[in-house]
C-alpha cells in the first residue's frame, strides 16, 4: 500500500520504480485503492519540480489539510520546520533539502495517521526515492528554476505573499504572522549585536592599543582584561573535574566524538577499532562498528545521530547505521593512502573526507556516490575538514601550511587561502554560530579566523610546548579546547584569546583528540584511553 499524492513516474534505467496515484479516506494518508496509472517519463527539471510540489500539496490534503503552524508545531525538536519553509516547499520555488523533506513528510503522515511515523515507514522511503529522482534530474540536466538561480547562500528567502494562488488565505495569514514575529526578533538581535560590537571594540582597543603585535608577556606582565559584564558566561565560575576514564581500547585512541544528544560517545584507535560508550555509566556498547584493516583516524556522528562515519589508514570511509547495528552501504574508497578526517554537512546529506591524495572529496550519504568533483587546491596531504554549521561552507587544512575555505554549492574556493601557521595545519573547527574558525598546527599554536573575510582574529594562542593536534568549541562557543602532544588540554576564551584556568594534565602521553558534548562534558583521547570531565562550580578561597 502506497501513500497519497505521489504520481507514477518512469525513473532512469538505474532506478526503475513506480509510484501510485492514490485517493485518501478521511483521517488517513493511505488508500486501499491499489490502482496505478501508466508510468510517465521524467520531464524537464522545472516541470518536474512543479509536479513534486503538487504531490506535496496532495499529501497535505490527504493528511487532513493541517494548518502551516500546526505542521511546524508538530515537527520533532531535532528537525524543526518553520511556517515559511513549509510554504516554500508546497509552492515549489525550489527543491527542498532531503532532510527537510523527510521531516515534513514524517510530520504530515503523523498528523494524518494520528500516530508517530518514522523514516523506516515505507511511504517515507518512497518519498526519499522520489526526491532522489528529481535531484538527479536537476544535477544531470544542469537546469534550475529562476528562484534557485537567485538563491541566497544564507538560506531560502521568504516567498511573496501576494499573487500566490497555491496557498490559501489562512496560509498567507500564518506567513504574515510569522514574518512579523521574525521581524521583532531580528530587531532585538540587531540591538544586542550593536551592544556586543561596541563592547568588543572597546575591549580590543584596550588590549591592542596602537601595536600590531601582542605585548610580551611574563610573570610580571599580562594583557589579560576582565570580561565585560555583558558576557553571560563568566569563565572563572567553573572548572573541569575528571568524571571517569574509559580504558577498553588496546591501542592509542586517535579520535573521539559525542553524538548530537550526548549519548553515545564514539572513539577510534590505532588498532582500527571503533567503540561506542554510554558516557553516563562508562560502559561500552556491546555492538560496535567494525571493518577497518588499519588505524581508524577519525570518527564523527551525523547531525541526526543516526549514522556514524569513520576514516582509516586503509583508505576507506565507513558508515554505520546505529539503529540497525550494521554498515550503511559499501565502504567509500576515498584515498590511495590514509583518510585522516571526515565531516558531515549540517543537513547530513553530504560527507567530506580528507586524505593522503590531496583533494577534498564529497560524498552523497544516501547513495554512497561522489558528489561533484573533488575540491583541489592544497599541494599536499589533507589532514582535517570541517563544515560550517550555518552555511554550505567547508574548511580544509593540510601539510602545505594553509587553511582553505570552499563553497560547497559551486565547488569553488571561498576567498584566498588562510596563511599564518609556520608548518602543517593539523585540525580545523567552526564555532557553533559559524562566526569563528579555529586552526591548530605543528607550530604549537592555535589561530582564530573570520571565515567570511579570511582575516585573523587577534594574535595566535600560545602556551602549548608541542604540536597541537585537535581543537573543539564548547556548545555555546564561549570556550575553545586544544589538545597537544605535550600531554595537556588547554582551554581558551575565544573573545579575549586568554587561557581559561590551568592546563588539564590527566593524561600521561600525547593527547590526540578533544570534543565537547551538548551538555558540556569534555572528552579527550590519548594512549591511556578516553578521559571524561564535567564542569563544576569553582569557588575560590575567601
Image (tube, rainbow, N blue to C red):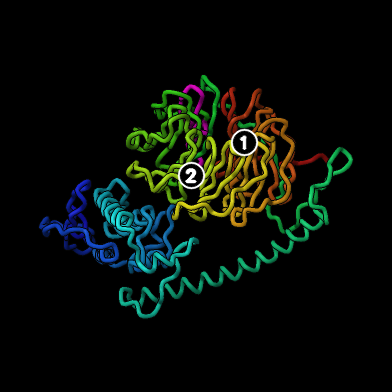
Q: Residue furthest right?
A: 220
Residue denoted by label 1: 424
Residue denoted by label 2: 376
- Judged from the image, the secondary structure of the residue bearing numbered disc 2 is loop
Mark 1 or 2: the one toward you:
2
**Closest to the observer: 353 or 110?**
353
Q: Is residue 522 visible?
A: no
Drawn side of residue 356 relative to residue 112, left or right: right
The residue carrying pointer 2 sits among few (fewer than 14), some (14 to 19) or many (20 or more) residues within 10 Å by Cα, namely: some
The residue carrying pointer 1 sits among few (fewer than 14), some (14 to 19) or many (20 or more) residues within 10 Å by Cα, namely: many
Q: Position of residue 533 (x, y in %)?
A: 62, 34
**Among the 4 quarters of the image, the one containing residue 290:** top left
Which residue is depicted at the point 65% across and 26% down? 507
Q: Which residues are magenta?
A: 260-281
Q: Position of residue 166 (x, y in %)?
A: 31, 74
- Judged from the image, the secondary structure of the residue bearing numbered disc 1 is loop
Which residue is depicted at the point 47% across and 35% down? 357
- Magenta stretch contains residue 276: yes
**Among the 4 quarters of the image, the one containing residue 197:** bottom right
Which residue is depicted at the point 40% across and 42% down? 306
Which residue is depicted at the point 57% across and 25% down? 529
Placement of 123 over or under 520, stated as above or below: below
Of labels 1 and 2, earlier in sequence is 2
Q: Give the CA separation, mark 1 to mark 2.
A: 17 Å
Amino acid at each position: 500500500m502506497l501513500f497519497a499524492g505521489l504520481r507514477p513516474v518512469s525513473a532512469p534505467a538505474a532506478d526503475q520504480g513506480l509510484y501510485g496515484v492514490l485517493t485518501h479516506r478521511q483521517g488517513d494518508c493511505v488508500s486501499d485503492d491499489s490502482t496505478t496509472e501508466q508510468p510517465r517519463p521524467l520531464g524537464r527539471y522545472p516541470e518536474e519540480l512543479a509536479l513534486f510540489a503538487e504531490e506535496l500539496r496532495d499529501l497535505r490534503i490527504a493528511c487532513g489539510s493541517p494548518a502551516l503552524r500546526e505542521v511546524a508545531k508538530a515537527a520533532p525538536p531535532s528537525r524543526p520546520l518553520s511556517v515559511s519553509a513549509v510554504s516554500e516547499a508546497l509552492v515549489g520555488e525550489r527543491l527542498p533539502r532531503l532532510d527537510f523533506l523527510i521531516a515534513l513528510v514524517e510530520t504530515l503522515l503523523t498528523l494524518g495517521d494520528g500516530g508517530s511515523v518514522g523514516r523506516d515507514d515505507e511511504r517515507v522511503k518512497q518519498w526519499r526515492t522520489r526526491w532522489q529522482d528529481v535531484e538527479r534530474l536537476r544535477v544531470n540536466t544542469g537546469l534550475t528554476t529562476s528562484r534557485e538561480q537567485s538563491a541566497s547562500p544564507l538560506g531560502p528567502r521568504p516567498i511573496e505573499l501576494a499573487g500566490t494562488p497555491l496557498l490559501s488565505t489562512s496560509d498567507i495569514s500564518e506567513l504574515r504572522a510569522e514574518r512579523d514575529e521574525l521581524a521583532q526578533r531580528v530587531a532585538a538581535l540587531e540591538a544586542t549585536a550593536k551592544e556586543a560590537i561596541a563592547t568588543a571594540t572597546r575591549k580590543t582597543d584596550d588590549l591592542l592599543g596602537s601595536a600590531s603585535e601582542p605585548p610580551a608577556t611574563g610573570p610580571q606582565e599580562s594583557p589579560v582584561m576582565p570580561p565585560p559584564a555583558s558576557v553571560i558566561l563568566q569563565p572563572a565560575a567553573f572548572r573541569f573535574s575528571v568524571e571517569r576514564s574509559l580504558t577498553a581500547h588496546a591501542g592509542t585512541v586517535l579520535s573521539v566524538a559525542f553524538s548530537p544528544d550526548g549519548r553515545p560517545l564514539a572513539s577510534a584507535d590505532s588498532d582500527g577499532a571503533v567503540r561506542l560508550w554510554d558516557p553516563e555509566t562508562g560502559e561500552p556498547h556491546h555492538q560496535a562498528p567494525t571493518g577497518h584493516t588499519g588505524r581508524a583516524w577519525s570518527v564523527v556522528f551525523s547531525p541526526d545521530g543516526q549514522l556514524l562515519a569513520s576514516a582509516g589508514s586503509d583508505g576507506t570511509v565507513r558508515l554505520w547505521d546505529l539503529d540497525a547495528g550494521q554498515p550503511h552501504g559499501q565502504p567509500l574508497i576515498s584515498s590511495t593512502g590514509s583518510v585522516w578526517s571526515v565531516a558531515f554537512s549540517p543537513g547530513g546529506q553530504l560527507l567530506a573526507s580528507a586524505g593522503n591524495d590531496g583533494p577534498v572529496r564529497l560524498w552523497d550519504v544516501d547513495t554512497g556516490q561522489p558528489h561533484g568533483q573533488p575540491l583541489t587546491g592544497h599541494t599536499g596531504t589533507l589532514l582535517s575538514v570541517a563544515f560550517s554549521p550555518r552555511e554550505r561552507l567547508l574548511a580544509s587544512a593540510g601539510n602545505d601550511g594553509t587553511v582553505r575555505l570552499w563553497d560547497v554549492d559551486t565547488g569553488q574556493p571561498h576567498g584566498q587561502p588562510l596563511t599564518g601557521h609556520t608548518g602543517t595545519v593539523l585540525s580545523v573547527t567552526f564555532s557553533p554560530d559559524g562566526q569563528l574558525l579555529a586552526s591548530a598546527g605543528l607550530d604549537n599554536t592555535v589561530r582564530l579566523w573570520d571565515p567570511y573575510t579570511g582575516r585573523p582574529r587577534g594574535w595566535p594562542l600560545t602556551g602549548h610546548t608541542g604540536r597541537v593536534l585537535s581543537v573543539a568549541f564548547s556548545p555555546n562557543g564561549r570556550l575553545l579546547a586544544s589538545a597537544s602532544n605535550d600531554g595537556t588540554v588547554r582551554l581558551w576564551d575565544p573573545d579575549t584569546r586568554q587561557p581559561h584556568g590551568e592546563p588539564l594534565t590527566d593524561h600521561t602521553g600525547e593527547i590526540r583528540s578533544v570534543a565537547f558534548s551538548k551538555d558540556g562534558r569534555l572528552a579527550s583521547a590519548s594512549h591511556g584511553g578516553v578521559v571524561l570531565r564535567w564542569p563544576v562550580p569553582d569557588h575560590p578561597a575567601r
